[in-house]
Image (cartoon, rainbow, N blue to C red):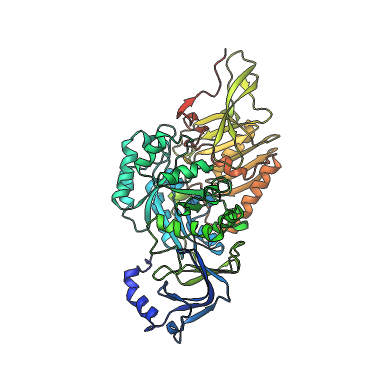
Amino acid sequence: MTHTPFPSWPDVAAQLVSVAAGRAAADTIITGGAWVNVHTREVLPDHDIAIAAGRIAFVGPDAQHCKGDDTRVIDAKGRYMIPGLCDGHMHIESGMLTPAEFARAVIPHGTTSMFTDPHEIANVLGLEGVRMMHDEALLQPINIFTQMPSCAPSAPGMETTGFEITAEDVAEAMEWPGIIGLGEMMNFPGVTNGDEKMLAEIAATQRAGKTVGGHYASPDLGPAFAAYVAGGPADDHEGTCEADAIARMRQGMRSMIRLGSAWYDVETQITAITEKGLDSRNMILCTDDCHSGTLVNDGHMNRVVRHAIECGCDPLVALQMATINTATHFGLEREIGSLTPGRRADVILTSDLKTLPIETVIARGQIVAQAGECVADCPHYDWPDAARQTVHMGKTLDASDFEIAAPKGANAVTANVIGVVENQAPTRALKFELPVTEGRVQATGEVCQIALVERHRATGTVVNAFVSGFGYTGPMAMASTVAHDSHHMIVVGTDAEHMAMAANRLGEVSGGITIFKDGKELALVELPIAGLMSDSPASEVAQKTEAMMQAMRDCGCTLNNAYMQHSLLALVVIPELRISDLGLVDVRSFEFIPLLEPQS
């Protein structure tokens, strides 16, 4: 299926002028609504919006002069007319859905624009995978802008990916029609140390006049942070406290504060606006990562806006953070983000600005959702076999692949252990005394075993380590080919045989998530596209995801959205401790450390 570009403003300017002046008829008029103006932070009752060629031609108290015999009239019935919501930073793959099915899932929640970084698929399929995501995104009835991934691998030398992204790849992608900028620059040590490759990617983006996304996952707000900002990243979503938000805004960045399935970083940072009274124009709401269960059951950007309001933010300010602030940041203020002439006619009708029920969604002048149901066509890309066969383990695994040998003669060892932190991306670097049985180190108590199984190049590599915080009990294992950002296979378990069963199962189904307990499979989420996504409807994927999360609970886990924690255990750019196919990584120093401390 080919993409038909949405007409540019200059292409239809003459028509918009004629409709606004009353010389031509509008395609659609929304009448009798309360106009939420995010430019002036006002609510103006009894206004009409006239739409032509998918764009807004006129907004005023009376649009009757724009009405013709064939003009469709939508009665707002006094409801609020707000701009379609924008997600300033997110990864479609985290929804376990393709762009088409992700769009179908979020349209009823009022999301009409997304700024998505497909760096997950870039790690598996390289530039060709990015192109596939970009091409399916352009087919959708809403605005999906693609950021060219910047870091695959996310930390060179710390992990091995299926493909690497080069500065030449970035320069090539900047010519594609749907590319809006450079995805989050996760290699922040590379930028602060003046790495030529990272700076070349940033330079290629800036020469194209596009926005550089940031990712500064460090508490150091001194010279290292200043050096990162000087390198060019224009926003950052890795803040977790008020000081982080303030530092970013003071240095001229946009502070993107996120509420995803497992990231709850709005409440701790929005106080920079609600309590400190700083200028809200430089703060943007986003989701970063939302799985399908959250999308189906809880919402998308409407959920984030509601949460910001619950945290004390003025509803109109919260709306600005999810509309005009985002549009302005990406240089699209004249295209999206407000209900004003010339802009794409992305409109939500809602009866309450605080609870934000999404009653009607209009995108590019067409009704795309009504009463919580998507009524638009969301076309699929024809994903090739190469994108569906990406789990290459090299061999069938057995329990011996997951055994950890102890030093000769040891009865106990001190192990470096990854500590999961509930509702946050960072982990803790912990140490535990672990027992030794028959020459093998044993996971015990609150400590489970974790393994990374290489799945891109069929090397047969298995790296073993330990993790705490999941609370699993009894013989069990959970495996996933979603393992940010390198997307090898992560297996967490209490028993080596179950870990082998779970890993081999994902090899059989070409990727996904599975949980085994007491020798039986409790749950399976098939993700055949790159081992990351399903092209099934979101409701079906969400149902399987909920079964998977229930299986985690049945195995003893009580963490909120523990799956997201599982999927980040190999993310070697967020402190403190992570696992990669090359070993155990201390992200505070970007050094490999031994799993077992030397015996004294």
Residue occupying the far left of the picture: 207
Residue 262 percent location from the top left of the image: 58, 46
* Front in this rendered view, residue 546 or 66: 66
**In this rendering, does residue 285 appear at all?**
yes
Residue 151 rendering spot, x and y as whole percentages: 40, 41
Left/right placement of residue 286 relative to residue 342 reads: right
Q: Residue at x 64, y 47 (%)?
A: 548
Q: Position of residue 143 (x, y in %)?
A: 44, 62
Q: Quadrant of residue 180?
A: bottom left
| Position in image of residue 27 (x %, y %) | 44, 79
Tally of numbered discs: 0
User: Is residue 159 depicted above or below 409 in this figure?
Assistant: below
Residue 238 can be seen in this image? no
Say if 394 sits above or below 150 in the image: above
Work out whether residue 160 or residue 157 is closer to the camera in this orientation and state it. 157
Task: Work out which quarter of the rendered image holds the C terminus and state it.
Answer: top right
Please state, as top left, top right, bottom left or bottom right, where the N terminus lies in the image.
bottom left
Residue 373 found in image quarter: bottom right
Please name the residue shown 31% across and 53% down the image.
Answer: 209
103 left or right of 231? right
For residue 113, above or below residue 272: below
